[in-house]
Image (cartoon, grey):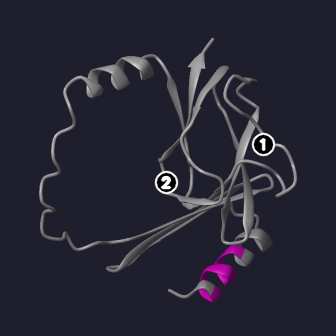
Amino acid sequence: MEIKDIRRIVELMKNNDLSEFSMKDKDFELVLKRGGQEVVYAAAPTMVPAAPAPAAPAPAVAEAPAAADEDDGLVEVPSPIVGTFYCKPAPDADPFVKVGDEVSADTVVCIVEAMKVMNEIKAEVKGVIKKVLVDDASPVQYGQPLFLVEPK
């Protein structure tokens, strides 16, 4: 499916006030959802499993428990879509949030751009930002953790 076809489907969704569209083919699956101003795109091609990768060397035993203990109790703020992560609304602006900032469920923490649409991502949890896990202008996947929040 080409991008022009997806754009046509999005336009039909807007014109007919549809909030969801899904289509599955042998080569891909397309799910489009929209609500309010936000349009969410998720397309996942079906992948043929590759040969297993060689096993990576195991991390040092002392490092693994320390990292796990440090992140215990923190809540992940995942990316709801595939796209490009932006930590600020404009290149010359301050970041939406930084480590140590308090957030509520409705606090916008970043933008994920998908197909030229800037989607504001909300924290969806009340707490304090403990870690920013993604660099600005980096690609992100569906479900990829963007932030770690200590809930309050």
Q: Amino acid at mark 2?
A: Tyr
How many angstroms separate mark 1 from mark 2 (CA)? 22 Å
* Front residue (pair 120, 100): 100
Residue at (33, 20) in percent of width and height: 66
The residue lying furthest to the top in this view is 152
Residue at (49, 57) in percent of width and height: 141
Residue 123: give x, y in percent of width and height: 66, 33
**Residue 85: which quarter of the image?**
bottom right
* Front residue (pair 65, 78): 65
Q: Nearer the viewer, mark 1 or mark 2?
A: 1
Q: Amino acid at mark 1?
A: Pro
The circle on residue 9 is none
Residue 139: give x, y in percent of width and height: 55, 61
Q: Check disc 2 and report the residue beneath it.
A: 142
Predominant SS of the magenta segment: helix
The circle on residue 95 is 1
**Residue 94: which quarter of the image?**
top right
Region in magenta: 4-10
